[in-house]
Image (cartoon, grey):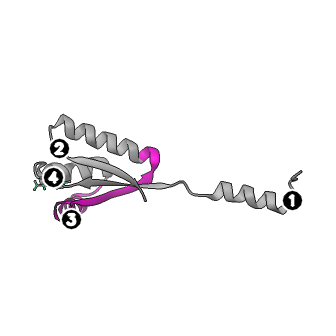
Amino acid sequence: MATSRDPSTVLEKKEARLKPPPMYEVALLNDDYTPMEFVVGVLQKFFGMGREKATQVMLKVHRDGRGVCGLYPKDVAATKVEQVSGYSRQHQHPLQCVMEEA
Ligand code: TYC
């Protein structure tokens, strides 16, 4: 039987406690219809970016097709995706927000 003095038991417990949670990238995808100004507003409202940073990220998405907005634990990332998707739908823009394990 394993006891608290058994070193293998101690190592196992420590590893389980210290393992970081998997993180998820939340990204925006480009499209031809969503106004640039709306995307900048989304990045400010939901990802806490200042106007300059938000503009840089929006332009990266516009140029490259995809851009990372932030890195979060799974539940936070899923909430961001829902919030941005709902907000875009409400405003009748096709902006796509996705998450992917980092
Ligand atoms: N391509 C869009 C336009 O020219 C702007 C845009 C940028 C749309 C980023 C989506 O995630 C996006 N109006």
Residue identifier under label 1: 6
Disc 3 packing (10 Å; few <14; some 14–19; many ≥20)? few
What's the residue type where badge 2 is placed? Pro
Determine the quadrant in which ligand 1 lies.
bottom left
Taking 7 as reference, is 86 left or right?
left
Residue identifier under label 3: 64
Specify start and end residues of the magenta stretch as a single range: 49-76
**How far is mark 1 from mark 4, CA to CA?**
58 Å
The answer to the question of whether label 2 and label 4 lie on touching residues, with beta carbons closer than 8 A, is: yes
The answer to the question of whether label 2 and label 1 lie on touching residues, with beta carbons closer than 8 A, is: no
Dot 2 lies on which element? loop
Query: Upstream in the sequence, badge 3 or badge 2?
Result: 3
Which residue is painted at 25% across and 62% down in the image? 53
Query: Upstream in the sequence, badge 4 or badge 3?
Result: 4
Q: Nearer the viewer, residue 102 or 79?
A: 102
Residue identifier under label 4: 31
The answer to the question of whether label 3 and label 2 lie on touching residues, with beta carbons closer than 8 A, is: no
What's the residue type where badge 4 is placed? Asp
**How far is mark 2 from mark 4, CA to CA?**
7 Å
Quick check: is the Cβ at mark 4 less than 8 Å away from ligand 1?
yes
Dot 3 lies on which element? helix
Label number found at residue 94: 2
Reply above or below: 3 against 81: below
Q: Position of residue 75 (x, y in %)?
A: 45, 44
